[in-house]
């Protein structure tokens, strides 16, 4: 969707959107008598997220949408719900152009730009394979003009939030695509094509490269698939030359059957999004490069497909990780941590970051614990945990810190190897985090984000429809803006 900013309402055909903060509705001035009476008949009171619709007796019957902000709403908190509500109401309405009038509501430049961000994100759809959509199901809204915003709002949208929207959209695209379209090699190709010209340096390790490095944990997951595993490394050098980078590592299981420990058939199709962590890392890298972030960041995606096969890894197998630790594979469906441990080891050996943040749709136990409202956060450093918590609140990608402790760590001791890949059922998300933690070098700040409940949604929100959410991109972008760029 094309987004513009203008000082006044344009001429021509469009749907007019006017925000209402309770009974404060400055944008309705001069539109004619009787509007308040119509709103009362619709029981509209300007409540947050509410909307009323009517037609004006002008320009052939202009559609008017009044969107509630809440009586005590502040622009910085109401902005995204406003943008998302207008996009959801008008996306398939038949209208092609919407004008949002913020006059008199004290939206600063950032809040006005975030209205545009939410409208852009809420308008995203994945219709690539829908060849028989009826006309009324097809999106029509092509442009949004925002008037009454500060003059700086357009620059804020263009430089800060438009690149972020592009990054989120890449993540959603990768997550939404079926597994016959996005597999390790095509994931890499899609990222290259999407980020061409942005200045990101790409490096790709194939299976032979990883075998030579001793990455037996990651390759063990991949050995049942005909699709070759890949380790994708993306470098953005926007900070001080030679400065220590922050490193993001994503789990990229492009399809997860569970392997020999196979999952139930019902619902297995959803496992196309088991690469949501890698998708978030890719989207964040695109966003950071797009807005030319003043930071050195390395994004790493461990990309595999977990399939059952005559050559597949078996429960009880022992594999050797890149750092030499031996792992007893109790359950082949606990594969994401095997991918992450080798990807993180490679990062520490080759990138030498001071901070590593990994993202993974890792455990069903996290969904049981937190539902679909927050991602789980585990961290070995209180300052890093606080920074990520703050970034989550500011971006909307919210996190809840979970515990780590020696008693949990002992639960993954193996009787025949250095470590086993699962503990008991109880505390499953915590023991999974401890598994990854055993591969973190001393002195490295580390956070593990289990986003199993957040990469996909069965209900819409202000910034996404049902389906891929893009969770994690805004979080990482906000963390870089607040912590890395500010030093």
Image (spheres, grey):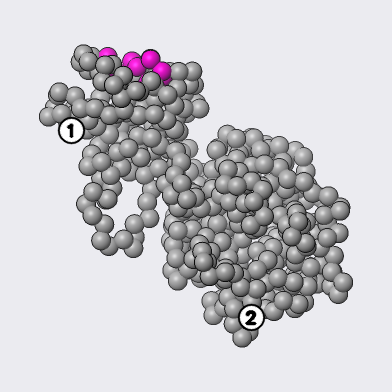
Q: Main secondary structure of the magenta part?
A: loop
Q: Nearer the viewer, residue 179 or 231?
A: 179
What residue did someone put label 1 on? Answer: 13
Give how far across and how far down residue 274 sits, in percent. 56, 61
Residue in view at x 44 percent, y 38 percent? 462
Please provide percent x and percent y for residue 417: 84, 72
| Rendered-image quadrant of the N terminus | top left
Q: Earlier in the sequence, mark 1 or mark 2?
A: 1
Local packing at callout 1 (Cα closer than 10 Å; few below 14, some 14-19, many 20+) is some
Label 2 sits on residue: 312
Q: Position of residue 31 (x, y in %)?
A: 22, 17
Q: Is residue 84 above or below residue 102?
A: below
Q: Nearer the viewer, mark 1 or mark 2?
A: 2
In the structure shown, which secondary structural element does the residue marked by tag 2 occupy?
Answer: loop
- In the image, residue 164 above or below residue 5: below
Q: Position of residue 381 (x, y in %)?
A: 77, 43
Q: In this orientation, does residue 95 appear?
A: yes
Nearer to the camera, 140 or 133: 133
> Callout 2 environment at 10 Å: few (<14), some (14 to 19), or many (20+)?
some
Corner quadrant of residue 20: top left
Asked if residue 26 lies in the magenta stretch, the reply is: yes
Magenta highlight range = 20-29
Residue 221, relative to residue 372: is it above or below?
below
């Amino acid at each position: 969707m094309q987004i513009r900013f203008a000082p006044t309402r344009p001429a021509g055909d469009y749907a007019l959107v006017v925000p209402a903060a309770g009974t404060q509705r400055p944008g309705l001035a001069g539109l004619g008598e009787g509007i308040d009476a119509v709103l009362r008949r619709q029981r509209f009171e300007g409540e947050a997220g509410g909307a009323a619709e009517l037609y004006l007796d002008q320009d052939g019957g202009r559609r008017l949408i009044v969107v509630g902000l809440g009586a005590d709403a502040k622009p910085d908190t109401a902005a995204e719900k406003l943008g998302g509500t207008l996009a959801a109401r008008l996306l398939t309405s038949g209208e092609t152009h919407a004008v949002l009038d913020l006059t008199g509501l004290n939206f600063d430049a950032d809040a006005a730009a975030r209205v545009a961000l939410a409208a852009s994100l809420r308008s995203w759809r994945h219709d690539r394979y829908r060849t028989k959509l009826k006309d009324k199901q097809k999106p029509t809204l092509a442009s949004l003009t925002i008037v009454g915003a500060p003059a700086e709002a357009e620059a804020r949208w263009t430089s800060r939030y438009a690149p972020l929207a592009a990054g989120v959209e890449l993540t959603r695209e990768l997550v939404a695509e079926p597994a016959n379209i996005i597999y390790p090699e095509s994931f890499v190709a899609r990222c290259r094509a999407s980020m061409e010209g942005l200045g990101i340096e790409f490096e790709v390790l194939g299976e032979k490269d990883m075998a030579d490095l001793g990455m037996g944990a990651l390759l063990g997951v991949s050995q049942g698939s005909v699709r070759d595993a890949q380790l994708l490394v993306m470098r953005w050098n926007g900070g001080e030359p030679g400065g220590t980078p922050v490193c993001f590592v994503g789990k990229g299981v492009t399809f997860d059957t569970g392997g020999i420990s196979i999952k139930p058939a019902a619902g297995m199709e959803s496992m196309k999004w088991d690469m949501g962590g890698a998708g978030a890392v890719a989207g964040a890298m695109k966003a950071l490069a797009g807005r030319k972030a003043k930071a050195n960041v390395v994004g790493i995606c461990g990309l595999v497909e977990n399939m059952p096969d005559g050559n597949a890894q078996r429960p009880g197998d022992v594999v050797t990780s890149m750092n030499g630790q031996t792992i007893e594979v109790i359950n082949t469906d606990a594969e994401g941590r095997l991918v992450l441990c080798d990807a993180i080891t490679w990062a520490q050996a080759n990138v030498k970051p001071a901070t590593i943040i990994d993202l993974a749709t890792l455990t069903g136990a996290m969904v049981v614990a937190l539902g679909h409202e927050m991602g789980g956060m585990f961290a070995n450093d209180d300052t890093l945990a606080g920074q990520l918590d703050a970034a989550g609140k500011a971006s909307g990608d919210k996190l809840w810190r979970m515990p780590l402790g020696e008693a949990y760590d002992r639960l993954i001791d193996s009787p025949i190897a250095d470590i086993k890949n699962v503990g008991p059922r109880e505390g499953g998300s915590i023991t999974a985090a401890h598994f990854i933690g055993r591969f973190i070098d001393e002195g490295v700040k580390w956070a593990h984000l289990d986003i199993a409940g957040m990469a996909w949604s069965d209900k819409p929100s202000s910034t996404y429809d049902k389906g891929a959410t893009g969770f994690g991109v805004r979080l990482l972008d906000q963390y870089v803006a607040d912590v890395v760029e500010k030093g």
